[in-house]
Image (cartoon, rainbow, N blue to C red):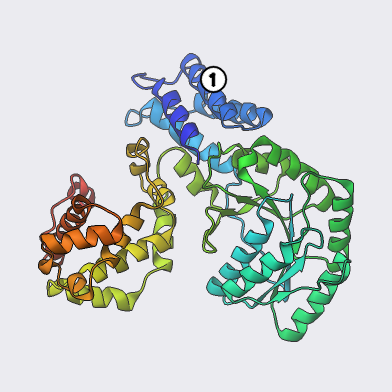
Amino acid sequence: MFENLSDRLERSFKLLKGEGRITEINVAETLKDVRKALLDADVNYKVAKTFTDTVKEKALGQNVLKAVKPSELMVKIVHDELAALMGGETAELNLKSSPTIILMSGLQGSGKTTFAGKLAKMLKDKKSKHPLLVADDIYRPAAIDQLKVLGEQIGVPVYAEESNKNPVDIAQNAIKQAKKDGNDVIIIDTAGRLAVDEQMMNEIAAIKKAINPTEILFVVDAMTGQDAVNTAKEFNDRLNFTGVVLTKLDGDTRGGAALSIRSVVDKPIKFVGTGEKMEAIDPFHPTRMADRILGMGDIVSLVEKAQEQFDEEEVRRLSKKIAKNQFDFNDFLSQINQVRKVGNIKDIVSMIPGVSKAMKDIDVKEDTFKKVEAIIQSMTPRERSHPEVLNSIRKLRIAKGSGSTVADVNKLIKQFEDMRKMMKMVRAGKAPQIPGLAAAKR
């Protein structure tokens, strides 16, 4: 996401490199390119024009310090305005009322049902809530079954009335049931259509009036670009929703919806969906997203994701094995699984400052680890725990069993040995210094 926009903005800032000061002429040239970059990213034209006008006004009003280059100052101003454009502050979900009633809205195919499941899992696991999912889509044949499957998968109850064709009654009955069962969050999955129509709007407006929800979340597919913003405006005019959910941000999207939607409907983006897994849901942080758009990474989110998967007992166990030089392929496989739990590889790479830019021409495939896992799983228990026994005959058998080559097996063994040596050096306090790190610490 945002890769093309990031590249275009970087090229725009180069127009100011080498300039001793900011002038109306060089700012105008830079912002002309910035505006083109935003429009190419499918940002609303009025939003792009207002944005660049604001940046220009602030840039010309700044006194450039000798220690700060004009291009660096422009990056800072653009960064701050991008964050403001997307809402500035992180918008929290309102969970103060009990029960909290969350009404999902949006077009068919936007990912409402899947997101409802993701949200329920997040509230259950991270907020210690007891959610109830409500199947209130009476039109799409598989909608109720899909929600039931998701509910079973994440351990959350699902309320459904297959024979009832009145969505208002279903929602009201679900709330009564939730109060009896002690569910403190009720997530109602409503019907969508292939396009905005009067019947759909009247139906969801009737549900809203009957249940008075705490939150109304509008779910939109970020890959639909400017159409997403237009649809959001129509829904907001009828429902006055409380927040936006952008799904499929891990896809081939230009990012225009994320940059435009807040300005057009004046409602915060509260969550983003970044993959198909039920854990692939993140609160939306405007400042962090601005960091990523400008190629600065998002190390805070990466650390938070890692901490969620942090297993203190596993770290202690691993530390003891490293100290005794007993780190083996079982541990190697365990570490791979820990990395995969943090998120998809492309998403992780985009969060590391500088790495995303350095690897932009490298195809980082999501199945990168599958070959590694296949090779390790083709080893016997003894081979995994005692890698030194791996001879040419064993390597040939492993290669055949994993659908790879002996060269692939040798490459993995070398990577494993390098990793084991590095871990031993770190443990002994002899790890090589990263250039610039010592100076930074001073």
Q: Is residue 441 above or below residue 401?
A: above
Left or right, 258 with reference to 332: right
Q: Is residue 193 above or below residue 396?
A: above
Which residue is pictured at 19% across the width and 77% down the height? 320
Q: Which residue is mark 1?
A: 32
Identify the amino acid type marked 1. Answer: Lys
* Nearest to the observer: residue 211 or residue 1: 1
Left or right, 431 with reference to 158: left
Q: Position of residue 325 (x, y in %)?
A: 12, 71
Q: Is residue 355 above or below residue 114?
A: above
Query: How many numbered discs?
Result: 1
Q: Position of residue 399 (x, y in %)?
A: 23, 57
Q: Position of residue 151 (x, y in %)?
A: 63, 72
Q: Do we see residue 286 in this rendering?
A: yes
Left or right, 303 with reference to 114: left
Report which quarter residue 71 is drawn in.
top left
Left or right, 312 with reference to 23: left
| The furthest residue to the top | 25
Which residue is pictured at 31% across the width and 69% down the height? 334
Report which quarter residue 417 is drawn in.
bottom left
* Nearest to the observer: residue 420 or residue 139: 139
> Are there few (<14), some (14-19), or many (20+) residues within 10 Å of tag 1?
some
Which residue is pictured at 45% across the width and 36% down the height? 76
Name the element at disc 1: helix
Q: Do we see residue 188 in this rendering?
A: no
Q: Position of residue 26 (x, y in %)?
A: 46, 16
